[in-house]
Amino acid sequence: RSNVATTGSASVTVHGAGFGVARYSAGVRTGYSACEATEWTSDTTVACKRAVGLRGTRRVAVTAGVRVGSLTEVFSYDHPAAEGVSANGQALDTVGGTPVTVYGANFGAVRMSASVRIGHSACEATFWFSDTSLVCTAARGMRAMRRLAVTAGARTGSVTNAAAYAAPDPTAIDLDNAPTTGGTLITAT
């Protein structure tokens, strides 16, 4: 089993037996998608130009005439790879709403169901731009550096220490008429 890119058009060669003795209508499917093109080579080899895809490990089915043969878990698509994050040089706002651009690979060749999580929180919205770029609107959060995870199809890739929320920044402490003993409620603003 090997991985293939999510963008499609990669050549997959299927080896086996009984694919026919001439170029008839041999067909190959990867998962639920037919190959973009199929080339019969011999009774034991058929090549196909694989279609775009995202979802996990797939089976391959070969049709020769009216007969079908298949193998399960033959190949899988590459995991999304988040390689960089840009929040325009600013820390994420603790109340949410900061746009975060995620750079990487294998986010999908078409707008599917890509999503982004920062820490344990899903972004409020995720916008797909290309196989290498997503923008998410960060949800509210706290704590310093957080892991960022990108899910595309059934695959998830992550990068640690990718985004940080702004630290609290108190500007004043109000201690009017505080007692000298016991507990006191302090309000930081």
Image (cartoon, rainbow, N blue to C red):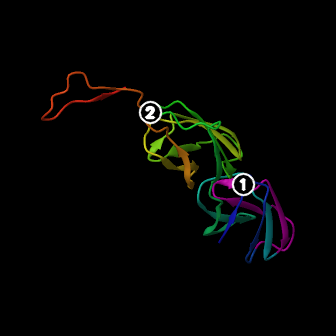
| Upstream in sequence: badge 1 or badge 2 | 1
Pick whichever, 172 or 22, lies toward us: 172
Contact (Cβ within 8 Å) of mark 1 with mark 2: no
| Residue 170: percent from left, percent from top | 41, 31
158 horizontally vs 35: left or right: left
The stretch drawn in magenta includes residue 41? yes
Q: Residue at x 12, y 34 (%)?
A: 181
Which residue occupies 50% across, 45% down? 118
Q: Which quadrant holds the C terminus?
A: top left
- Residue 150 is labelled as none
Q: Residue 138: percent from the left, percent from the top? A: 52, 36
**Rendering quarter of residue 9:** bottom right
| Residue 116 place in picture, x, y as percent | 55, 44
Q: Which residues are magenta?
A: 19-42
> As rendered, which of 149 and 18 lies closer to the eye?
149
Report the residue marked by disc 2.
Answer: 169
Is 122 drawn above or below residue 65 in the view shown?
above
The vertical placement of 176 against 104, above or below, is: above
Type of amino acid under label 1: Ala
Near mark 2 (Cα within 10 A), the count class, few <14, some 14-19 or many ≥20, is few
Q: Nearer the viewer, mark 1 or mark 2?
A: 2
Q: Please tell me whether residue 31 belongs to the stretch shown in magenta.
A: yes
Quadrant location, the N terminus: bottom right
Q: Three-letter amino acid code at disc 2?
A: Asp
Dot 1: element: strand
Secondary structure category for the residue under label 2:
loop
- Judge whether 82 appears above or below 47 on screen: above
Q: CA distance from mark 1 to mark 2?
A: 57 Å
Q: How would you rate the neighbour count of disc 1 (Cα within 10 Å): few for under 14, some for 14-19, many for 20 or more?
A: some
In the rendered structure, find residue 34 and report the number of the disc placed on it.
1
